[in-house]
Amino acid sequence: MVDIRCDLYATKLLESGEPRFIFIITTQEVDCIVSKKDGVPTSGNSSTIKRVTYYAALGKKDHPNLEKVGHYWELKEIQQTGETKQLL
């Protein structure tokens, strides 16, 4: 990953009264998959950059372990919503 940007897109209350925070995450990623065995690229190219957009929803955890984790929140959903190759 070359760069990442995270923007709060929306907030809403579910019927249960639980708050939900919606984020749009935009990254710049190197389009290259490397073998763990020998470090050789198996697909893509190390000089190709792509812009990838994700939708993520953050909500309260049903049974939080505050002593272990220290907060109430968990990632409820994440999905890739777009991908564009960039020119260098």
Image (tube, rainbow, N blue to C red):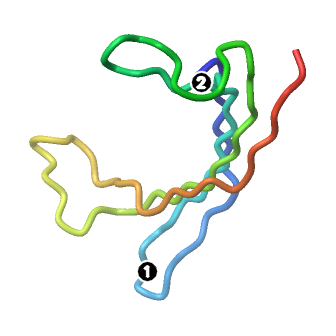
| Count of numbered circles on the image | 2
Q: Looking at the image, which residue sits at the far bottom?
A: 15
Picture disc at residue 17: 1
Please state the horizontal and vertical placement of residue 1, each as a whole percent of the image. Answer: 58, 22
| Residue 6: percent from left, percent from top | 64, 38
Q: Are marks 1 and 2 in contact (CB under 8 Å)?
A: no
- Closest to the camera, between mark 1 and mark 2, is 2
Q: Residue at x 70, y 40 (%)?
A: 52
Identified at 30% across, 17% down, the residue is 37
Residue 18 place in picture, x, y as percent: 42, 74
Asked which secondary structure carries label 1, the reply is loop
- For label 1, the crowd category at 10 Å Cα-Cα, with few meaning under 14, some 14 to 19 and many 20 or more, is few
Amino acid type of the residue that numbered disc 1 sits on in the rendered structure: Gly
Give SS at disc 2: strand
Taking the image as shown, residue 65 lies to the left or right of residue 55, namely: left
Residue named by callout 2:
32
Q: Quadrant of the C terminus?
A: top right
Relative to 38, 40 lies left or right = right
Residue at position x 67%, y 49% from top? Answer: 24
In the rendered structure, the answer to whether residue 31 lies left or right of residue 71 reads right
Check disc 2 and give the amino acid type.
Cys
Could you tell whether 19 is left or right of 5 in the image? Answer: left
When asked about the image quadrant of residue 67, the answer is top left
**Residue in the picture at 70% in, 27% down:** 28
Q: Earlier in the sequence, mark 1 or mark 2?
A: 1
Q: Residue 45 in the image: x percent, y percent?
A: 67, 20
